[in-house]
Image: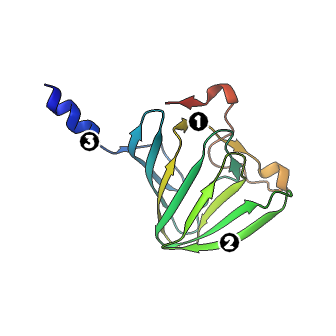
Amino acid sequence: MKKKKDNKKIFPSSKKIGPRNWGTEELLVHIPKVLTLKKITIKKGKKGGLQYHRKKNECGYIIKGKMLLRYDNGQKNLKKKLLKAGNTFHFPPGLVHQEEAITNCTIIEASTPHFNDRVRVEKLYGILDKSGLPTTFKKDIKFK
């Protein structure tokens, strides 16, 4: 029946995304070839990888918590900014970034639907941490 299918488009079901050692990632909405909307939780004291995206363009809104954001100022120099509930951020393609939870954090993230787009760069900044998800190859990026 067409009505049920249309209701799924209007009211999509959320979906957990893979295991994450730093918290949870939940895909709330995926509009094919347009955008994704996610709910991300990061546990106090945990952080994601220092990374950039080749194609993915993402932004977010912090619903709850305090987070330390590390980002490259464009001169191979990491800067830090403390963000809290009510703050927003934008990571265009190529911007090196890392989120670290000072307290338990909840973030709503919107991005282009480029899946599997991640370049880890800890080594470039003299950081030895290799935990978390690895770099993906450009050919593995999926635009869904």
Q: Residue 77: percent from the left, percent from the top?
A: 84, 61
Q: Which of 66 and 23 is in front in this view?
A: 66
* Of the pair 27 and 86, the residue shown nearer to us: 86
- Residue 36 x/y as whole percent: 46, 44
Which image quadrant for residue 17?
Answer: top left
10 Å neighbourhood of mark 1: few (<14), some, or many (≥20)?
some
Mark 2 residue crowding within 10 angstroms, few (<14) / some (14–19) / many (20+): few
| Residue highlighted by disc 2 | 81
Q: Which mark is residue 141?
A: none
- On the image, the x and y values in percent for residue 108 come to 45, 58
Q: How far apart are marks 3 and 1 (CA)?
A: 26 Å
Q: Which of 23 and 85 is in front in this view?
A: 85
Q: Which residue is drawn at 61% across and 57% down?
A: 90
Q: Quick one: label 3 or label 1, which is nearer the N terminus?
A: 3
Secondary structure of the residue carrying numbered label 1:
loop
- The amino acid sitting under disc 2 is Lys
What label does residue 116 carry, if any? Answer: 1
User: x%, y% of residue 113?
Assistant: 51, 38
Secondary structure beneath disc 3? helix
Q: Looking at numbered disc 1 in the image, what kind of residue is underneath it?
A: Asn
Q: Do the residues labelled 1 and 2 touch (CB within 8 Å)?
A: no
| Rendered-image quadrant of the N terminus | top left
Q: Mark 3 points at which residue?
A: 10
